[in-house]
Each structure stands twice: as C-alpha cells, then as structure tokens.
Amino acid sequence: MYPGQCPPFLIDLEALVTGSSFSPPPHLAQAATAIFGERLALATEYAQRLATDGVVRGLIGPREAERIWDRHLLNCAALGELIESDASVVDVGSGAGLPGLVLAVARPDLSVTLVEPLARRTAFLSEVVSDLGLDNVTVARVRAEDAVGTLPAADVVTARAVAPLDRLAAWCLPLARVGGRVLALKGATAADEVEAHREAIARVGGGEPVIRVCGADLLPEPTTVVEVVREREVLPASTKSGSKKAGSARSARPRSGSRAPRR
C-alpha cells in the first residue's frame, strides 16, 4: 500500500461515480466535447484512472471522484485558452496531473513537463503518460526550486493549489523565460492574494498580476487564474549574499602598493 493511500477495502469504487460510466455527466457533455474534441475518449480514460487508481493510491480524495469532470478535468482544461500554440509548459507540483496532464490531453501541440518531487506521484504520472500514449509529456521527479537551470526555460509555468501566491511566484517565475508567464489556478481568494502579495511578486521579477477567467461560456463555474509575466531575471538571495560577502572581503584587503594597517 502506498504511503497516504486509502485502504482498498474502505473504497467502493463503483459507488464513487455516477453509474458505471466515467464519461462526462450530461450537463457537462457539451463543454467536454468543445474543450477536448476528438481527444474526449482519452480524457475519459484519464478520468477513470483518477477516479479509481488515483483514489486508491491517495492522490485525490474519495469524495472528489464524483466531481472529476467539473472540479478537475474541465476546470484545468479551460486554462488552455490562455496558452499559445506549440508552447512549452512546466507544471509545478503536478500531483495527480492537475493541470499539466489535462492540458497535455486537451492540447497535443503543447510540450508539457510535469514537475513533482514525490515518488508515489511521479510513479502514477509516468504510468498514465505511458498508458495514454502521451508523447508530448515528460515527468520530472524534482522540486521546483531544484529544477531551475536543469529544465529549459518555459513559455508557460502552471500551478494549482500548491501554495500562496508569493511562494508560488518565487518557485515558478525562475522556471519561465523572460517574457514567459506563470498561470496559477486560484479560487475565490484570487483578488485577496494579488493584493497581499503584489510586492513580493515584483521582488522576484514578476509584473503586475492579472486575474483572468477561463471557460466562462462553457462551464457552470469558470476557472479563475492569476497571470504573472516574468519581466526580468532576479538572482537568488543566496547568490546575492555570496556576492556581497565576496565584495566585503575584497574591500577589506589592502590595496596593491598600500601598507597594511599596524597592529
């Protein structure tokens, strides 16, 4: 049994979903078809994996299985309307693949890297990527802060339910190219977080945060996204402090040709 997973004997998988089908419910069928198009069958297969294996392995809660389509798949896939064609995407704290794996299913033109530090989650992600034949996805078992410099700078960095906006910006902005964007899925707290963390975002090289709404014409509950452009590179604090110490050490040395102070 995986750490944190729900014991199988406590789960009635058939009771977790409406009926025996993992297809989108009737009131969401039109939205699902519009967003996923010819890849709807692939999205349905992923929905099944989330609602069964994902629950058993503790990646999502048992009660979430009934809301796979509205709360998870469609909520994440709507983000695609903010992403340009053929973009490179890094998904930070991907977990069960939300939103990165959903975007890869809906948008085969995207090149998606799923960044996740926990082994049990990356094992699930790798299995799903292989089983669904997603050749536009790479799974990287690494922390976001350790991935800087090891992954190519992305056009877009995504994150969902990972951390408050100030910490999220510090982790995600360095993974984007200058001019690239961070797209953070947020709920009702988006405006409050923007107001509280605007200065912190600027300190790590981000521009003015903008709140976007996705899927307004399709979804009963549209997706709220905070968009931040990476405007400039900012040296990590450790690098800055190291430079200051080195500079202080240099300034303490006697200049060439000058006498050392007497003791």
Image: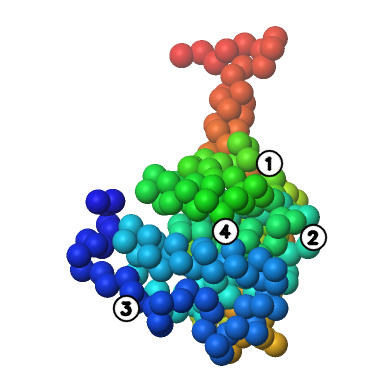
Say what amino acid the circle numbered 2 marks: Ser
- For residue 152, which numbered disc appears in the image? 1
The residue shown at (61%, 17%) is: 254
Would you call the spot at circle 2 few (<14 residues within 10 Å), some (14-19), or many (20 or more)?
Answer: few
The residue shown at (49%, 47%) is: 126
Q: Is residue 14 left or right of residue 117?
A: left
The residue shown at (59%, 42%) is: 148
Q: Give coordinates of residue 16: x percent, y percent.
A: 35, 76
Of marks 4 and 3, which one's residue comes earlier in the chain? Answer: 3
**Kind of element beneath mark 3:** helix
Nearer to me, 181 or 2: 2
Of marks 3 and 2, which one's residue comes earlier in the chain? Answer: 3
- For residue 15, which numbered disc appears in the image? 3
- For residue 85, which numbered disc appears in the image? 2
- Placement of 41 over or under 116, stated as above or below: below
Say what amino acid the circle numbered 3 marks: Ala
**Kind of element beneath mark 4:** helix
Q: Are marks 4 and 3 in contact (CB under 8 Å)?
A: no
Q: Is residue 206 left or right of residue 66?
A: right
Q: Give coordinates of residue 171: x percent, y percent.
A: 55, 53
User: Which of pointers 3 and 2 indicates the residue nearer the eye?
Assistant: 3
Say what amino acid the circle numbered 1 marks: Pro
Say what amino acid the circle numbered 4 marks: Leu
- Disc 1 to disc 4, how far (Cα)? 19 Å
- Placement of 39 over or under 88, stated as above or below: below
- For residue 101, which numbered disc appears in the image? 4
State the image quarter where residue 147 is shown.
top right
Of marks 2 and 4, which one's residue comes earlier in the chain? Answer: 2
Q: Residue furthest left?
A: 9
- Placement of 113 over or under 259, stated as above or below: below
- Disc 3 to disc 2, how far (Cα)? 39 Å
